[in-house]
Amino acid sequence: MSFSWTRVQAIVVKELTDYRRNRFVMLFTMTILPLIFIVAPTVQLLTAPAVAASSKLDARIGISLLYMMLIPAIVPSTVSAYSVIGEREQGTLEPLLITPIRSEEFLIGKALAVLIPTLAVAYTIFAIFLAVAAVFAHPGIESAIFAGSHITVQLVFTPLLAAWSIWVGIAISARSSDVRVAQQLSVFANLPPLAIVALLTFNVITSSTGLALGLAAALLAVDALGWRAVAAMFDRERLIAGARA
Amino acid sequence: MSSEQAPNRPGPRVEALRTTGRLDPLVAAQLDGSAAQFALVVEHLSKRFGERVAFDDVSFEVGYGEVFGFLGPNGAGKTTTVRTLGTLIAPTSGSATVAGIPVSAANGPAIRARISIMPESPGLYLRLTVTENLRCFARLYELDDIPGRIERALRAVNLLDRASDPCGSLSKGLRQRAALARALLNDPAVLFLDEPTSGLDPVATHDVHELIVSLRERGVTIFLTTHRLEEAERLCHRVAILNTTLRLIGQPDELRERLFSQALEVRVRGSLANPGSVFAGLPGVDGWEPSASGGYELTVSDPEIAAPAVARALVSAGADILSLAESRHSLEDIYLQLIDEDVEAKPQ
C-alpha cells in the first residue's frame, strides 16, 4: 500500500473540525495570543518619532518584525506538542493506528492541520500590521517597512519557522508522556531559530541577501528532513503499549 | 450454542473478491495454503517487554465465521495478543497469519485494512459528531460509498437517530455502539472486540451482546477478549483461557468434560437410610457423595445410562424423587479451576 493523500486529508479535516469546536484553541491560541503579538509592534510603530537616526529607526522596525516572527514560532508549538500525546491521553490514538494509516501519513496530516491555521493567522496579523503602518505610521517609517526586503523576509520565513516549530512540537509530543511537559519543551525548542532571527534583526549578524537565502535554505532543509526524522522517532509500539521490547 | 460448528473456510466476502478479481495478490498468494482456511492462525507466538512476559508460546486457529472467546484475568496478555495480531506491536517470537496475510511490519497496513479492532476504550473524538467520527475513519480506510457505509454501520448498531449528535453527548453505552459502528465500516474479515462490555451497565451490556449475536448470525469472524465468563459462554463458539500461556482451548462443553467428571444431582424427600446400597453397582455410576443441597451427587461415566438406572433404584428403595438432573459446571467453574491451579503453582 502506497502513500495516500486521502488518509492525510482525513486527518487534516478531522483536526481542523476539532480545532473549530475547541474554544481554547480558537479563542486563546488562534486569536488572543496572536493579537498580543501585534500590540507591541504597533506601539513601536506609532510612537516612533517622525525624524530619527537611521539606526534607531531600524531597531524599532526590527523589534516590530521580530514580534511578527514570534507568531509562526509560538502559536503552532503548543498545538503541535499536543498532537500525539493528546491523542494518546484521550484514548483516540489506538483506534487511529489500527487503521491502515502509515506513520508518515499520520504525521504529515497532523503537521498540515497545524500549519494551515498558523499561516492564516500569521499572514493576517502581518497584513493588519502593514495596514496600520500604511495608514497611521510616519511616512519615513512606512516607506522603510515597505521599501526594504522586510515583507519578503516575513513571507518566506513565516512558513519555514512554523514548519520547524511544528516538527519539533510533534517530535516532542511523540516521545513525551505528559502534555504539559511536551508543550513547555516545545516552546523552549523554538528559541534557537528565533535567536538567529533576533541577531539578524538587530544587526548583530550583518544581514545580506546571501545570508538570508542561506538561512532560508538551511531551514527548508531542516524542515524537509524534519518529517523523516519525526517519522523515525514515531514508535507505534511504545505509544500504544507504553513499553518497548 | 456449542452445537453450532464454526466453518473453517473463507467467508462469502473472500470468495466474492476472488471471483471478481479484486482480491489482493498478497491474500491470493495465501489462499492455496492451509492458513487461508482460517481467519487467524497463531503459532508459538510470544511477546516480552524486557524481562516481563506479556504472553508466551500461544498457538490457536480461528475459522472464518467463528466467534472465538479469549478469556483471562487482568494482565493475562489478552490485549497484547490482540495488538500483536493487529500489527500494532511486534511479536518477540513465533508467527501468525491474519486474514490470510502473515503478520510482519511490512504487511501491517495490508492486514489493518482487512481487520478492525474495537479497543476497550471507545476512543471517539468527543467534539465531532458520530457521523464525522465515522467519516474520518472511512477515509482512513479509503472506502467507497462512504455515506452508504456509515448509514449501514449505524443502522446495524441502532444509532442512526443519533448520527448528528456530538460523541461527547452520548452515554457510555452509546459511545460503545458508535465505536462498534466504526469497527464495522470496512466490513472486516476479522473483528477484534477487546472487552466490549467493560464498564457498561446491564442494559448496555445486553445491547452489546445482542449486537454481537447479530454479527455472528451475519457470519462475521469475531475475536472477543473478555473476563466476563457468562459473556463468552453465551456468545462464543469456542473459548481459550489465557494466563500468560494458553491454558485451555475448546468449546465450553468440551472443556467441562475435560476438566470435570460428569455428575448427576439427586434430591429425594427426607434422606435415604442406606444410600450406598441404593447406588452401588448401578450401570454408569462410578461413585456418590452427599451434596451441599441436602441430596446426593453421583459421579457417572454416562448420564444417559446412569439416570434411568438411578431412578429405578430409588423407586425400588421407596424414595420419593424430588429431582434428578445432570449437574452442569459453568464456564466460571472451569476458569476458576484453571486460575486456582495457576495461583497454587506460583512460588510462595
Image: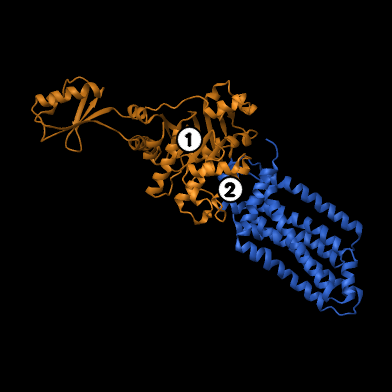
Chain colours: A blue, B orange
Q: Residue at x 52, y 50 (%)?
A: B163
Q: Which quarter of the rendered picture does the N terminus of chain B lie within?
A: top left
Tell me the amino acid under the disc marked 1.
Ile
Q: Position of residue B252 (x, y in %)?
A: 37, 31
Whether B56 is drawn above or below A235: the answer is: above
Q: Residue at x 60, y 57 (%)?
A: A179
Query: Given the image, what chain letter belongs to the residue carrying mark 2?
Result: A
Alpha carbon of mark 1 to alpha carbon of mark 2: how far? 22 Å
Q: Are marks 1 and 2 in contact (CB under 8 Å)?
A: no
Please tell me whether mark 1 or mark 2 is closer to you in this view: 1
From this view, report whether residue B76 is shown above or below residue B3: below
Q: Quadrant of residue B274?
A: top left
**Any part of residue B41 in sight:** no
Residue named by callout 2: A93
Q: Secondary structure at mark 1?
A: strand
- Disc 2 crowd, CA 10 A, few/some/many (<14, 14-19, 20+): many
Whole-percent x and y of residue A244?
59, 42
Q: Which mark is drawn over residue B42?
A: none
- Judge whether B245 appears above or below A111 on screen: above
Give the number of the disc on residue B222.
Answer: 1
Q: Position of residue B8 (x, y in %)?
A: 48, 25
Q: Is residue A156 visible?
A: yes
Q: Residues within 10 Å of mark 1 (few under 14, many from 20)?
A: many
Q: Is residue A45 left or right of residue A166?
A: right
Quadrant placement of the C terminus of chain B = top left
Query: The residue tagged with tag 2: helix, strand or loop?
Result: helix
> Given the image, on which type of amino acid does mark 2 rest?
Leu
* Residue B88 shown left or right of residue A169 in the figure: left
- Along the viewing direction, whichever of B259 and B7 lies nearer the viewer: B7
